[in-house]
Image: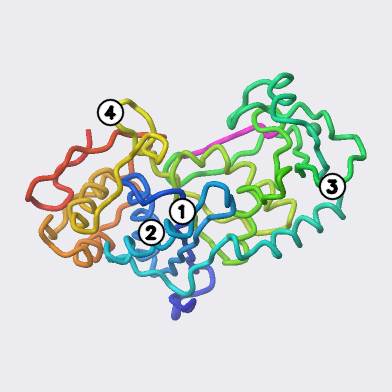
Amino acid sequence: MTEANTGSSPAETYIGRFAPSPTGPLHFGSLVTCLASYLDARAHRGTWLLRIEDVDITRCKPEYADDIVATLTAFGFMWDGEIRVQSRQTMQYEAVLRHLIESHAVFACRCSRKEIADSAVDGVDGPVYPGTCRNQSIPFAGNAIRLRVPATRNCFDDRVQGKVCQELASEAGDFVLKRRDGLIAYQLAVVVDDAEQEVTHIVRGADLLDSTARQIYLQQVLDLPTPTYLHIPVVTNSDGQKLSKQTLAAAIAPADASRALCRALAFLGQAPHPATTNAPPAEILSNAITHWQPDAVPKQRSAPEPATFGDSQCTSKLIT
Ligand SMILES: [Zn+2]
């Protein structure tokens, strides 16, 4: 079902997505991201897609993907169309890589992780690649493939975070599109998927803010349209760490769906609405769509997890 925009002009087309990685069950941080992308899509009468980002098969498990789908259903989220699974799209990614090789936009790199760390400065996402293999004729087979990036300052306007700029060469460096072990890198998969699914609006966590300039640059190299971006704050625990599998974030439980949704709405700065914490998840979501205010999302890269809710009006306890 991709005609959710029937009746509106092409300029108003909205296709959004939620794209979890099945490295564990959904936690409160993933719920907040899911909720924000869902509300923004539905408030725009847009299409909302679900994509399983399991391109890194060393970290992802199919049973977690099944668990994520079941949890989203229990929380009342309804996506449009088929679920796209990255591990089934390898042919598309390889086709794009061949195109990039033919156009000399990429080069092969045989540096080890240690060699890069030894001779590099830290950037937004670990060591900045020092360019060792950039001008060598190294065979592509069996080596990593990196995209050449220019020494230009690239900026974009984020709907929540405002103007975000990055100098690709000094802050990110020539980045990996295919790993040495043969796996397609996230940056390539996400750009190809968003383009093939015709995603127009990306709503996701601010932990990906520093990846966005690289993704926009890759879109430009591939002559693909750039979606609009909205990065919500990352949810942190009492130690100030991002909620994740690594920081042992608790799984969200379907039995507690309504309260968890209300806490997520409070985290997103949404004003109180008629539903209470006792209402079924579908009713809370429906109210939240009607009252969705993206401008109220805190303009921060991270914010602490809100306290647990009692029985009350949904979202009445806003974060401070
Ligand atoms: Zn290299």
For the point 53% across and 55% down, the residue is: 53
Whole-percent x and y of residue 21?
48, 52
Q: Kindly check if marks 3 and 4 are in contact, taking CB atoms under 8 A apart as contact.
A: no
Q: Rounded to the nearest whole Å, what is the CA distance between mark 3 and mark 4?
A: 45 Å
Q: Nearer the viewer, residue 239 or 282?
A: 239
Q: Rounded to the nearest whole Å, what is the CA distance between mark 3 and mark 2?
A: 36 Å
Give the quadrant of residue 274.
bottom left
Q: Earlier in the sequence, mark 3 or mark 4?
A: 3
Is 71 on the left or on the right of 183, as rendered?
Answer: left
Q: Of helix, strand and loop, which one carries label 4?
A: loop
Q: In the image, is residue 163 part of the stretch drawn in magenta?
A: yes
For the point 62% across and 62% down, the residue is: 195
Label 1 or label 4, whichever lies nearer to me, is 1
For the point 33% across and 49% down, the residue is: 32
User: To which residue does mark 2 refer?
Assistant: 68
Whole-percent x and y of residue 197?
57, 67
Q: Start and end of the magenta stretch?
A: 162-168
